[in-house]
Image: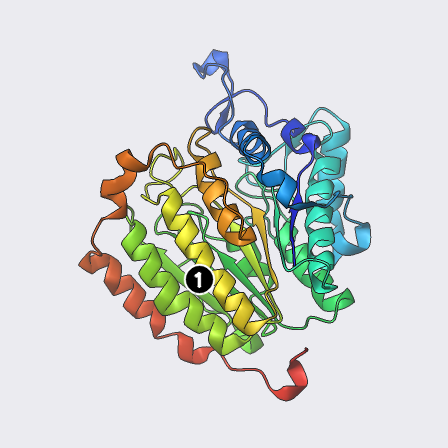
Amino acid sequence: MPTGYVYHPLFAWHDTGTSAGLRPADPLAGVQPGKHVEAADAKRRTHELIHACGLLHKLVVIEPREATMTELLRVHTGDHVQRIKEQSERSGGDAGDGFSPVGRGSYDIARLAAGGLVELVTAVAKGELTRGYALTRPPGHHATADSGQGFCLFNSLAVAARHAQAELGLPRIAIVDWDAHHGNGTQSIFYTDPTVLTISLHQALSYPPNSGWIHEHGVRDGTGYALNVPLPAGSGHAAYLKAMRQVVIPALDRFKPDLILLAAGFDANAWDPMARQVLTADSYRTMTRLLVDAADRLCHGRLVATHEGGYNPWYVPFCVLAFLEELSGHTTGIPDPYADVAAEYAAEPLLHHQDDVIQEATEFLKLIRPPTTATTSN
């Protein structure tokens, strides 16, 4: 079965404004006008590489559409949706935390991102596709039910997960998040819900502050269904691969999902300005292979990814290409041009303080309860 792909030029039109990295431009305060770190370049160049190398022609292009109000309100409060709509219709604003710019028209673009992922999940659930990747913008995994955070307006993954449960007959959803920053919004939305397993691999003590600790594992009925692996800064190929093999894959095996969703952030790469991890394109390729194998074994191959972070415009495209080649099963013959520079990172040994975190995280696997016959689908 083919692999689906979602992209639209409007994703590059989401306007995060002139900034100095994170801060809005303010010449009176000495903040010189520049480009916001969450600009379109990395994702636009990624799409162009996918197209230029011929991989696009081997994918099934899914046309996105705007998420409906019903779909958004399964996850977000009406006040949050209305606030973004009003800002978008004026001259812009911020979705909640001061780090989530809303540009003019961003409401419609964010709805297009969420709706595009819903369409992709629908095609996979119906058996028209086996897997899929949505190269969307703005990102979503930091957005909570009632607020935007960390560049995110609507939580597309959560919207897609609830759609899969409500409309597609897929009751158990696993969300794996390997973005360098904790998927706090997704975790918070499902924190009491035993039908959605959230797993986040991220850099400890990064964004959001004081979030994503190992002891955060859900509450009430959701106890055990949030799993966090806060890897120390400087973690690379060896640490991430061990975390995948020792924590993420065993968690999926215990949970037995009907669908695996992936928050595919690429900001843990060795040259990203927003994190201090040292993954390479080959790291993402290998992690993808592990998830593809798990999806084939557990849920008829149903694996759908959406792009989250990743801010280095010259390296992120090659990380995504390696990921998408592995996801789709097609090779392009385009090598990672930075592989020789990255070779030392990829060979990095697993360090004791990294392994300690992974070992501690494995202790929480026992809290994940396997499904009963009544809670599984085909």
Tell me what residue is drawn at x 29 percent, y 50 percent: 235
367 is higher (above) or lower (below) than 66 = below
Rendered location of residue 338, percent (x, y):
34, 33
258 is higher (above) or lower (below) than 210 = below
Q: Identify the coloring.
A: rainbow
User: Viewer-proximal residue, 21 or 337?
Assistant: 337
Answer yes or no: is residue 55 visible. Answer: yes
Q: Could you say whether the residue bearing mark 1 is in a helix, strand or loop? A: helix
Rendered location of residue 283, percent (x, y):
37, 49
**How many circles with numbers are drawn on the protein?**
1
* Residue at the disc numbered 1: 290
194 is higher (above) or lower (below) than 137 = below
100 is higher (above) or lower (below) than 370 = above
Instruction: Check disc 1 and give the amino acid type.
Output: Leu
For the N terminus, give its image quadrant.
bottom right
Rendered location of residue 216, percent (x, y):
43, 65
User: Viewer-proximal residue, 134 or 330?
Assistant: 330
Question: Quarter of the image holding residue 222?
Answer: bottom right
Answer yes or no: is residue 77 visible. Answer: no
For the C terminus, give its image quadrant.
bottom right
Question: Label 1: few (<14), some or many (≥20) within 10 Å?
Answer: some
Residue found farthest to the bottom: 373
User: Viewer-proximal residue, 348 or 331?
Assistant: 331
Residue found farthest to the top: 28
Rendered location of residue 347, percent (x, y):
23, 48
Question: Quarter of the image holding residue 103?
Answer: top right
